[in-house]
Each structure stands twice: as structure tokens, then as C-alpha cells.
């Protein structure tokens, strides 16, 4: 999707530094996401990808630098306020409760977001598989179904930006394709996406731009085509030819 360079970013991450104890994990990470854009954050294990996402939503405090969302400084805002401003966050562990039904998961999220029941119907149009399993409990869902439920739950609040951490983790290839197609449908609604993903092929199929991290620093920013044209970056920082 072509982007006009003068469109103001929805999310701006500027030179953030994050620590775990004395360990300096993020060392000046900067990136942005424009309205309607999908940005993939790639890198090897331990590169700082998940910490970047957690820093954006204040689950891991930023010690230096700035995070802005739609012109607001959210660097030190509590997580619940960041979510309320319009950021949806889907963590790697999915957060599905085994004893709750799909319907109950969605109803709780709907209540928390203060949205009408019609919003659930809108979201379920994107997730036909989930709409067929409303009475199933969390423990009865496959890994792919749990992932789709986690994404659907985040979308109930009508976020302008959806942040996802490893949505294909642990899924069979055919289910990875389903998750990819689901995210493509989400993108078509105009929702911006910031995606951390180890499945590089899936990430590049969705992304308008790519940011590559290594050792808590940005090593590359560009389009998927520009990344493909730099095999040294792919080999050094992603481990692929």
C-alpha cells in the first residue's frame, strides 16, 4: 500500500531506552506507524522486539525517550489509559481463560470497552471461525482459534492501532495462513498494525514497512522490497538468505 510521505504518523516512538534492572535492553529505538499502515518489527530472539511493544503500552517503563500516539505523549501513561486512547494489544501468551466461553470472553471485553452489542457482530464478520464457536470454552479451542479470539477481543474496543506479539507462534502452517488472512482483513478496515513476528514470510506479506532490531537497536527501516534488496541485512539480523 503506497503511503504519502506527508501523512503524520499515528504512533511515534522516539529514541526510547528501556532497562530490565541494570540491563540496558532498548538502546535508542525509533519507529513510527502511519494511519492504515502495517509495520513489521523483525529480529532474532532477544533483539528487543517484545520489549519494544511492552514499552509502547507501558508494561515495561521507558527510562528515556518518547512515545506519542495521535499527538499525545503516552510515554508514562498507565496501560489502561493507553488502551482507552485507541491502542489494542495482543500479547504472545494470548490471555485466554480455559473456563470461559468464547461469548463470555467477548462480552467481558465489550463491557470493558463500553461498546454496544452491535460492535461484537461487526468484529465477528472478520472472524467466521470464531463466530461458529461462541459456546466453546477456551480450553476447547485450537491454538489458532485462541489467537483469533485474542485478536477479536482487542478489536472490540475499535482501536486505531493494533499491536500484536508473535501471532503465529506455535501454530501449524495452515493455521498461520488463516491468521495472516485474518490480519489482512483487519488491515482492510483501516486499522493500523504493529506486528512482531518470527515468521518473516508472513510478516513481509502483510507489511508496508519493516523495522529490523538487533541488540536493542534499529538496524534497518524500509519497505519489504528494500529489505529483499539487502541480503546482508537479512542474513546478519534475521538469519535468512
Image (tube, rainbow, N blue to C red):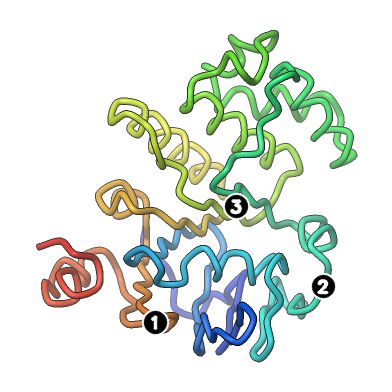
In front: 240, or 46? 46
How far apart marks 3 and 1 lie (CA) works out to 21 Å
* Mark 3 closeness class: few <14, some 14–19, many ≥20 residues within 10 Å: many
Residue 86 in percent (x, y) is at 74, 57
**Where on the picture, by quarter, is residue 161?**
bottom right
**As displayed, is residue 79 above or below residue 69?**
above
Residue 210 in percent (x, y) is at 35, 67
| Residue at the spot of label 3 | 162
| Residue at the spot of label 2 | 77
**As displayed, is residue 156 above or below residue 192?**
above
Which residue occupies 63% across, 33% down? 152
**Viewed as shown, does residue 82 lie left or right of 29?**
right
View extreme (front): residue: 22
Q: Secondary structure at mark 1?
A: strand
Between marks 3 and 1 in the image, the one whose residue lies nearer the viewer: 1
**Where on the picture, by quarter, is residue 141?**
top right
Name which of mark 3 and mark 2 comes first in the sequence: 2
In front: 82, or 100? 100
* Mark 1 closeness class: few <14, some 14–19, many ≥20 residues within 10 Å: many
How far apart marks 3 and 2 lie (CA) works out to 18 Å
| Residue at the spot of label 1 | 218
Which residue occupies 48% across, 27% down? 143
**Viewed as shown, does residue 56 lie left or right of 143?**
right
Q: Disc 2 vs disc 1: Cβ atoms closer than 8 Å?
A: no
Amino acid at each position: 500500500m503506497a503511503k504519502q510521505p506527508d501523512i503524520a504518523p499515528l504512533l511515534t516512538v522516539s529514541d526510547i531506552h528501556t532497562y530490565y534492572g541494570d540491563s540496558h535492553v532498548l538502546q535508542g529505538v525509533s519507529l513510527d506507524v502511519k494511519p492504515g499502515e502495517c509495520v513489521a518489527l523483525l529480529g532474532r530472539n532477544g533483539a528487543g522486539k517484545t520489549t519494544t511493544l511492552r514499552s509502547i503500552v507501558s508494561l515495561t517503563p521507558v527510562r528515556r525517550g518518547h512515545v506519542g500516539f495521535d499527538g499525545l505523549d503516552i510515554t508514562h501513561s498507565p496501560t489502561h489509559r493507553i488502551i482507552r486512547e485507541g491502542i489494542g494489544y495482543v500479547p504472545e501468551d494470548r490471555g485466554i481463560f480455559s473456563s470461559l466461553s468464547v461469548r463470555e470472553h467477548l462480552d467481558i471485553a465489550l463491557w470493558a470497552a463500553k461498546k454496544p452489542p452491535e460492535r461484537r457482530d461487526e468484529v465477528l464478520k472478520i472472524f467466521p471461525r470464531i463466530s461458529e464457536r461462541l459456546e466453546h470454552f477456551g480450553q476447547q479451542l485450537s491454538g489458532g482459534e485462541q489467537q483469533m479470539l485474542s485478536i477479536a477481543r482487542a478489536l472490540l474496543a475499535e482501536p486505531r492501532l493494533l499491536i500484536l506479539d508473535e501471532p503465529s507462534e506455535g501454530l501449524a502452517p495452515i493455521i498461520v495462513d488463516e491468521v495472516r488472512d485474518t490480519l489482512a482483513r483487519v488491515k482492510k478496515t483501516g486499522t493500523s498494525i504493529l506486528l512482531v513476528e518470527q515468521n518473516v514470510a508472513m510478516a513481509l506479506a502483510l507489511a508496508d514497512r519493516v523495522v529490523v532490531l538487533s541488540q536493542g537497536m534499529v538496524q534497518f527501516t524500509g519497505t519489504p522490497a528494500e529489505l529483499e534488496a539487502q541480503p546482508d541485512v537479512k542474513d546478519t539480523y534475521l538469519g535468512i538468505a
